[in-house]
Image (cartoon, grey):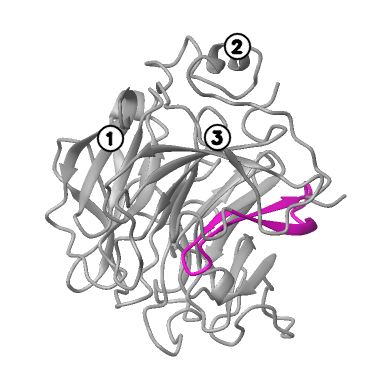
Amino acid sequence: MSVRNRRFRAVAVALGAVLALTTACAFGPPGPDEEGEPPNLPPPSAPSQGPDAGDGDQEVVVTVLAKHLAIPSGIAFLPDGSALVTERDTARILRVGPDSDADGLTVAEVRRLNEAQPSGEGGLLGIAVSPKYKTDNTIFVYYSTAKDNRVAKTTLKGKLQPILTGIPHSAGADGGGLAFGPDGYLYVGTGDGTPTGTQAPNAKNLGGKILRMTTAGKPAPGNPVKASLVWASGFHDVLGVAWDKNKKMYATDSGQPRNGEINVVDKGRNYGWPKADGPGSDAKLTNPLLSWASADSTCAGIATLEQNIATACLTGKRIWLAGVTANGTVLGNPQPLLVGQYGRLRALAAAPDGSIWASTSNQEEGASPTADDDRLIRLVFSDGGAGRS
């Protein structure tokens, strides 16, 4: 069954419609045991489809949540439904929502990391919220200094405490994917940081890897090598990681000369860079689940939604949406959405209400910003996809 034939049940969570729809849904506003209220969202824009939309294709309803941001690079949600958003070049952490005003959700600066030193693709990148945030108030950030990339933990007003240093730093492949897995450990996507890809296959180097660690920055139990942080290797630039409801892990790999990728990430696997750019023939290397020409991809953020994967693309200026089976194989042809409508798209995250939030990345060099950029947008897919009755 192709993704074009997968029909989903509609959930439109916007103003008056939210109360009628979310009370019967498995995904929706925080329940009575969670803090706060769901965001008071502005009304959505008209639905959009891909350029070759036909009967059975997925439509997406887009709501602009916030405007006039500066290269939002990471999105992570707090228990009250608001989001923490990082800005790459300003090194600010913003709190978006849950309240709203005439322009969308309220945006407030809650922290500026003077330790982060933006240059090229580096700066303040990924962000993750502790699974125990209600009791420890802790967040984790991935950021660049003049000499390396680092992972640190902090509270919104506390001292920044680096837990991992020495991740390779370069002008164009700094990684920055950061998220807690279903196992409670912190996963970190890094970039190779070299023009020829010498660090990605090197088991002793942190570049071009997905790392798995404790909240103290130590190798997590069950890693392929007991004393090593490395979970998987052979990547060019990992900007996003996510898991589906079956606990299967997916990651983007961007910036290769010819192809952008989505990979199913398994323990100890080598994903090919620099020997392979996209699918290859070496049986020792793991081929990507999906790949596209770089001009149509260079995808950064990734999120899962029921039995679907979505990824936000920079060069491709689109969302790719693909259906997958329970064992992680692709159903039908991936569908391009929002092609060119919002420019470069970077961060992507599944929200607590079952929608997906994405950020534009049009304030960076070489892009073409509009008067509203950069923006944070909310996506709800037609016939369901955001929420489930």
Q: Left or right: 170 with respect to 32?
A: left
For label 2, the crowd category at 10 Å Cα-Cα, with few meaning under 14, some 14 to 19 and many 20 or more, is few
Q: CA distance from mark 2 to mark 3?
A: 16 Å
Q: Which residues are magenta?
A: 311-337
Q: Nearer the viewer, mark 2 or mark 3?
A: 2
Q: Is residue 315 above or below residue 369?
A: below
Residue 335 image offset from top left, x and y in percent: 70, 56
Residue 202 image offset from top left, x and y in percent: 47, 81
Q: Left or right: 223 with respect to 175?
A: right
Return the mark for residue 58: none
Marks 1,3: beta carbons within 8 A: no
Quickly name the residue at label 2.
20
Does the magenta run of residues contain 325? yes
Q: Is residue 186 visible?
A: no
Magenta stretch: dominant secondary structure: strand
Residue 236 image offset from top left, x and y in percent: 48, 75
Q: Is residue 257 visible?
A: yes
For label 3, the crowd category at 10 Å Cα-Cα, with few meaning under 14, some 14 to 19 and many 20 or more, is many
For label 1, the crowd category at 10 Å Cα-Cα, with few meaning under 14, some 14 to 19 and many 20 or more, is many
| Residue ID at (31%, 32%) | 103
User: Which secondary structure, mark 1?
Assistant: strand
Q: Left or right: 307 with respect to 343?
A: right
Question: Looking at numbered disc 3 in the image, what kind of residue is underneath it?
Answer: Ser
